[in-house]
Image (cartoon, helix red, strand yellow):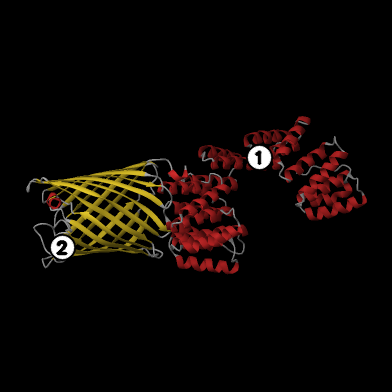
Amino acid sequence: MFLLNYTYAQNMKEGFNYLETGNYQDAEIYFKNILSDYPTNKTARLCYGRAIGLNGKANDAEILFKALLEDFPNDFEVKLNYGESLLWNKKFTPAKAYFKQLITEDPKSFAALLSYANTLSNLKEYPEALTYVNKALNVSPGNINALTSKKYMYLGYAYQKQQAQQYQEAEALLQENHRLFKNDKDTLINLANLYLIANQLEDAENTYNTLAQKAENMLTALNGLALVAHLNNKEKKALQLSEQAFLSLGANTDANMIKPTTERYIQALIWNKKFKTASQLISNLIKSSPNENWILALRATLNIYKSDFKKSVTDYNQILLNDSSSFDGNLGKANALKALGFYKNAYTSAENTLKFYHKQKDATNFINDLNTNFTPFGETKASYSFDNGDNKAFNVQTGIEFPTSTKFKWLVNYAHRNTSNKITNNEATSNTLFAGFAYQILNNITLHANGGITAATANGNNFTQFVTDVSLHLKPFKLQVLDVGYKREIQSFNAELINREIVMNNLYANYNLSTNFNLGWFTQYFYTWQNDNNNRNLLFTSLYYNILSKPALKAGLNYQYITFKNQVPTIYFSPEKFNAGEIFVNLIKNEIITKPNEWFYELTAATGLQFINNDKSQSTYRIQGKLGYKFSNRCLSNIYGTRSNIASATAAGFTYTEIGVRFKWLLFNSPVFRK
């Protein structure tokens, strides 16, 4: 906006041209020379003030215009320029009062109306800003400066609503902006981004397709469509779209599009686990620009997908050294710290994100998810089981986990089991009360310790036994998890076994190895010694392949080996040697990632062969299923069932069926230590 009257200043035309074309450095020099000859010339002083103000010397310009105002207190043009200098210095509150006064003085001044509207916009008072920009347009219909201001007021107002998660109001504002400025690129990009945040992926895709109707917007559209495909779990499509955009980069490409297009392509490679190609591209970028935040963020993301979380933290720390307000740096670091088990620091990093990006959805959701992990909850399960040996059992189990910090939680569990067999006329009841704790010793080592009493009654025989389960949960290296522990329990599969008061002492280890190429390996070993002078060795191992990630689909091979020192087949299944192998498929939508008012599920199907001692092989099958619903962030429930004819340490060749229901609820809205 150029607020000068040129009537008596034709000899300064060269300087005016500098100002109008944005050549403020030359304008500053030009008018400074004029003032050396004519120090009191009002027009030269105004132009010089504008030149230095627009050339980054806003404070000097304000001082100059204030002096002019003292010399010409009733000159409206001087008043307007002084007001604008307040805007250059971001003194929006005094500017608001000042321009309000000028509008009172001249209600039809286009410059005053537009400056007041822009001031209100900078103060994020968008409804009133729009009112006054419309008044400015009534004075000067179609004015390009006013229309541009109006567009950005709508964009700012919509962003304000978006940050408050008022998505419908934000959409209405952007749609109105799109009606006024048909197919405007900025409006469409903001609209698509809103749909992404609101998880309206179909609307986002349609908006990017509208954007793609103009050839100059094609790269922006392809990058956006690739992200939509990723959020729809269509990773191959995301890579196809981003590769199309990346390969189209050339000498004539808009320089502003090279970075986002390269970034999206590398992200798509990472999403598709093409780590080698992504790593090579990132390495090439780092060679030329070793300290660019967006490149460091790509490498950090790659390492998160590869579970190299320590390397990710190193990159995120460097990003934050470069820019403490970096969104990628703060929230990315929070995710990496959470994966490493540094939960308190993860909270801090996420909260730092919100200091710079108020109410940002991803950071807010991260904190909410972390809160869920540390919010006390109760869980109750009830099940009924039966087998072809006429054993029946009814089981109820309820427990509470009560975290008091990110490192410590109390554990309480109670179980009631009633078993009967109408053929042998046996019936037994057992009640077990467990109490204990879990304590995170180091970020990768957690101690679980539980102890309690089992009280049982079987055919008039009453007894109590101490039971316990103490274990260490370790993450020794990346992609590896190891559990080692000791467990003392009562054999309670059926009434006959409860009546014999068989105590099982178990030393056990569970080991899981994951890889970056979808292959996984799980192994479990139990060594058991019992108070009936019998010992057992049990080995189970599973090699599996992750076919899909959402929903999770994996298939693999299982092998189980069991041997007992003594064979007591009339009492319980105790072969000298037992071998079983099976192939299995597992489909699961995890309840953790399930949103409120959505279903979650799991289905496992397996078949194979088992060999008991030296007998002929027997075919086996196993079917397990779960179907649940998440009613809210605090409450969920599911039913489950299993049917199998696989022999186990307690049931020789039984056809076994179990059905049950489970209910879980969070006791509070948030962790007790964060209230």
Query: Where is residue 91 drawn, in percent x and y?
Result: 72, 42
Instruction: Tell me if mark 1 has few (under 14), some (14-19) or many (20+) residues whose alpha carbon lies within 10 angstroms of its own.
Output: some
Reading the image, the residue beneath label 1 is: 123
Q: Quadrant of residue 440?
A: bottom left
Reading the image, the residue beneath label 2 is: 534
Q: Is residue 547 visible?
A: yes
Q: Amino acid at mark 1?
A: Leu
Query: Where is residue 24 drawn, in percent x and y?
Result: 78, 53
In depth, the one of 128 and 351 nearer the eye is 351
Q: Amino acid at mark 2?
A: Asn
For the residue labelled by badge 1, is the local secondary structure a helix, a strand or a loop? loop
Q: Is residue 221 left or right of residue 148?
A: left
Q: Is residue 401 left or right of residue 190?
A: left
Q: Quadrant of residue 632?
A: top left
Instruction: Tell me if mark 2 has few (under 14), some (14-19) or many (20+) residues whose alpha carbon lies within 10 angstroms of its own.
Output: some
Q: Is residue 399 left or right of residue 113?
A: left
In depth, the one of 306 and 577 nearer the eye is 577
Look at 36% across and 48% down and name the residue there: 410
Query: Where is residue 202 drawn, in percent x and y?
Result: 45, 46
Q: Is residue 494 above or below residue 521?
A: above
Look at 42% across and 55% down and name the residue there: 234
In depth, the one of 379 and 248 nearer the eye is 379
Residue 240 marker: none
Q: Is residue 248 visible?
A: no
Which callout, 1 or 2, points to the residue nearer the camera? 2
Q: Is residue 178 above or below residue 29?
A: above
In depth, the one of 450 and 586 nearer the eye is 450
Contact between labelled residues 2 and 1, with CB atoms less than 8 Å apart = no
Query: Where is residue 78 drawn, in percent x and y?
Result: 82, 40
Query: In terms of sequence position, does the residue under pointer 1 or pointer 2 come before the other?
Result: 1
Count how many numbered circles sit on residues in the image.
Answer: 2
Q: Quadrant of the N terminus?
A: top right
